[in-house]
Image (spheres, rainbow, N blue to C red):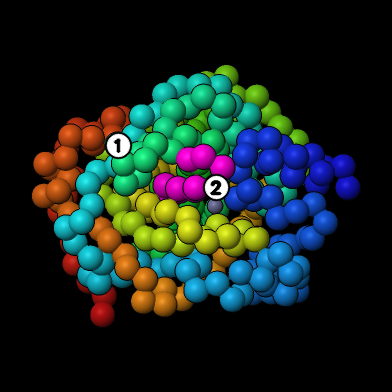
């Protein structure tokens, strides 16, 4: 199928295999080819079922290890992009939008895309949506920043994307300019753990950084996405005793690399204890 080939080709071109499951094996989120069956659909997808460090996960905030993290140094900049409907999500490919440093190593931002509801949960709760900002270092190292998204005000930074969602698989739309820094929440608090791609082939050793505080989109923006993808989130995976770290407010305050997000008027509230349990 031409569109499928194009989709895979574009994904390869942008050097991200996050959503390139291979042109020959169809996978979906629900039903017979849904996320619980991925590992059986293709031998190349076996990690989806046998992997021990899979994503997404539920993050229990009070169990996260404190004290070892610093704010992420983001070096994002405005640049052009391409909005792609890849058959599984809307993905914005970026050619020159800067980078972020994870554990001292520079990772180039190559694309971001969306899932609804959010794949990751915090204290058992999902958000309406999540944006995954996919970064690469060299040929194989992947680092993702997950920005949770909840219903609220219209997101002006994402308006050029949500106003131009390509309606069918393989279709693209140009994006004149977007600065990924405008997507970051003002609160630099994040959770870090080692996981995997959340789509086949579920490759592991992906560095995950889940921003704790959600950004907002309007109901109309969420509805525009859901018209194309009603549900495109993998179910949460076993943590298998993995270490999950969290940036503490004091470390955030002493850090010098807080993101230059818009609307950062008030300092972020300290982490609150979950009221459940
Ligand atoms: Zn994703």
What is the total number of numbered labels drawn onto the structure image?
Answer: 2
Residue 169 in the image: state x and y as whole percent: 76, 44
* Nearer the observer, 106 or 235: 106
Instruction: Classify mark 1: helix, strand or loop.
Output: loop
Proximity of marks 1 and 2: CB atoms separated by less than 8 Å = no
Q: Residue at x 41, y 73 (%)?
A: 239
The residue that disc 1 covers is 73
Direction right: furthest residue = 1
Q: Is residue 3 left or right of residue 130?
A: right
Please name whichever residue, 220 or 209, is drawn nearer the observer in this view of the structure. Answer: 209
Residue annotated with mark 2: 140
User: How far from the left and from the top, in percent, is residue 207?
Assistant: 42, 54
Above or below for 152 versus 236: above
Residues rendered magenta in the picture: 137-146
**Secondary structure at numbered mark 2:** loop
Residue located 44% across and 28% down the image = 98
- Quarter occupied by residue 28: bottom right
Question: In the figure, is residue 247 to the left or right of 113?
Answer: left
Position of residue 46 measured from the top left corner of the image (x, y, whole percent): 66, 71
Magenta stretch: includes residue 145: yes
The crowd level at tag 2 (other Cα within 10 Å; few <14, some 14-19, many 20+) is: few
């Amino acid at each position: 199928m031409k569109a499928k080939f194009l989709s895979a080709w574009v994904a390869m071109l942008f050097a991200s295999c996050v959503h390139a499951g291979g042109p020959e094996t169809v996978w979906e989120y629900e039903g017979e080819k849904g996320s619980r069956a991925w590992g059986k659909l293709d031998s190349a997808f076996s990690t989806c079922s046998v992997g021990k460090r899979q994503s997404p996960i539920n993050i229990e905030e009070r169990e996260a290890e404190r004290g070892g993290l610093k704010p992420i140094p983001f070096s994002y900049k405005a640049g052009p992009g391409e909005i792609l409907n890849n058959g599984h999500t809307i993905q914005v490919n970026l050619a020159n939008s800067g980078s972020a440093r994870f554990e001292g190593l520079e990772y180039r931002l190559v694309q971001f895309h969306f899932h609804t509801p959010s794949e990751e949960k915090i204290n058992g709760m999902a958000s309406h949506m999540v944006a995954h900002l996919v970064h690469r270092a060299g040929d194989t190292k992947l680092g993702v920043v997950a920005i949770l998204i909840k219903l609220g005000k219209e997101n002006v930074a994402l308006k050029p994307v949500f106003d131009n969602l390509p309606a069918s698989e393989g279709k693209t739309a140009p994006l004149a300019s977007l600065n990924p820094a405008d997507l970051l929440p003002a609160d630099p608090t994040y959770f870090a753990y080692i996981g995997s791609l959340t789509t086949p082939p579920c490759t592991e050793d992906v560095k995950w950084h889940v921003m704790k505080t959600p950004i907002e989109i309007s109901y109309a923006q969420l509805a525009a996405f859901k018209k194309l993808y009603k549900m495109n989130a993998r179910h949460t995976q076993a943590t298998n005793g993995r270490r999950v770290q969290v940036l503490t407010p004091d470390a955030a305050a002493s850090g010098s690399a807080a993101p230059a997000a818009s609307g950062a008027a008030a300092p972020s509230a300290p982490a609150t204890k979950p009221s459940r349990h």
